[in-house]
Every structure is written in C-alpha cells, then in structure tokens.
Amino acid sequence: MISVVIPTLNAEASLAQCLTALVPAVVDGLVREVIVVDGGSTDRTLRIADQAGCSVVLSPECGRGQQLISGAAAAKHPWLLFLHADTVLEETWVREAQTFIDRADAGQRPPAAGMFRFALDDMGFKPRLIEFGVALRCMLFRLPYGDQGLLISRHLYNARGGYKPLTLMEDVEFVRRLARSERIMLRTPALTSAIRYKRDGYLIRAARNLTCLALYMARVPATTIERLYRG
C-alpha cells in the first residue's frame, strides 16, 4: 500500500534506526517497499540499505529535491511516505497512518496529505522550546518541514505537481502547493536527530532556520539561502 522514499547522503549514523521503525508496518503489510535514494554517499549508507532489503536508487543529481523526485518515480504503490534518514517514527504511526489511508480510500474525507508531529531526540528545555515553536508554526500556518514526513497518495502528489529539483526548501515549496485543507497534522511524533542543533547551538540553529524560511518567502535566490543554511 505504501512506498517509503528516503533520500540519503552519508546517513550511516541514523539510517538503521529510521528503517527499524518501519519494520512493524512491513510485517502488517502497510509498507510494501522502502526506496533509499542516495545522493553519492561515501560511508556505509548503501550497505545498510542493501542489508535491510531496501530498493536502492542512485540519484542522477545531488540534492534532496531531485532525490525525492527519483524515489517517487521508482515507487510502485498508491501511497507515498517521504521520510528523512535521521527521522524515526514512533510506533503509533502504523495505526494512525492506516486509519488515515482507510478513510481517504473509502471517501470518508477529502484528499489530503498527513505530516507527523515534530520532536527532537534530546532532553532539556531547549529541545522542548524548539518543538513548541514548530507546533505553533504548524498550528497557525500548516507549514511543516520535511523532517516531519509526508504521507500522501500518488494521485494527490501528481495532481499538485510533485517535488521540484531544489537543493533546499523543496519541502516548503511543495507543501505550499497543497491547499491548507489538504495539510493534516497527525499526532504521532517523528523523532528527529538533534545533532545539528547541538553542534550549532539551539538558538543559533533555530534562528538560521527561520531566517532561511523568511528569505525563501521573500524570493531570495536558493543559492544564497543555501550558503546561509550550510554555514
């Protein structure tokens, strides 16, 4: 029923945990295939994906937007779950996703995409503050990022034009093409690695992310935003 698409680039430290969280859904038959789309890893990412039984696609271009496009093109099933390699879905996702899909397929709700609740895998006040900020953004603007996952039918994905081959902000660009009523916030946490926040500092990283979003909304060139984001 679901094809999971995971873009990777040197993701050996997190990929195994991401894939492990999908096992119950594979056993239940909800997830029928997992596609790892690699952007040129030089570590053990491809070996981990192969040993886990994933289908591996080598992206013709580096950049998450292109990787997501390639993964969607290779997927064989009617529902797509786009997931970052450093994100781990909590076990309740299987039941919630199944209910979401069943209602959509039965015509009990209009077509929509589901995004999970953002959470960071770190303790303390600062991670909770970041989570609160993301929850507030999602409540006010229905504007989740890619690290919250995206569960969407292929029909709706195609109808909205799919991802664009962007190296940054591909998630925001696509979600904004969904109507507000088509963006459904699910309750299951998507636990995301806090390594970047701990490395850069929580406040600095959060400020950088907000600045990148503001610059994107102001139509600043993606190359300029990417330099800020990577810096």
Image: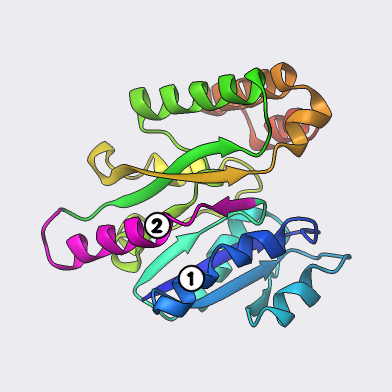
Please tell me which residue lies in front, 98 or 171: 98
Residue 139 included in the magenta stretch of the image: no
Where residue 120 appears, as percent x and y from the top left, is 62, 36
* Number of numbered markers: 2
Q: Residue at x 35, y 26 (%)?
A: 139
Residue at image point 34% right, 22% down:
140
The residues bearing labels 1 and 2 have C-alpha atoms spaced at a distance of 17 Å
Residue, x 33% and y 52% (percent of image)?
Answer: 113
Element type at mark 1: helix
User: Is residue 72 among what the camera can see?
Assistant: no
| Quadrant of res 197 | top right
**Residue under circle 1?**
24
Magenta part of the chain:
87-109
Q: Position of residue 122 (x, y in %)?
A: 68, 34
Q: Looking at the picture, which amino acid does disc 1 mark? A: Pro
Give the amino acid type for the residue marked by disc 2 in the picture.
Leu
Instruction: Tell me the tag on residue 151.
Output: 2
Which picture quadrant has residue 47? bottom right
Q: Position of residue 59 (x, y in %)?
A: 68, 69
Does dot 2 land on a helix, a strand or a loop?
strand
Up-down: is 22 above or below 143? Answer: below
* Label 1 packing within 10 angstroms: few (<14), some (14-19), many (20+): some
The image quadrant of residue 208 is top right
Label drawn at residue 218: none
Horizontal and vertical percent for residue 112? 26, 52
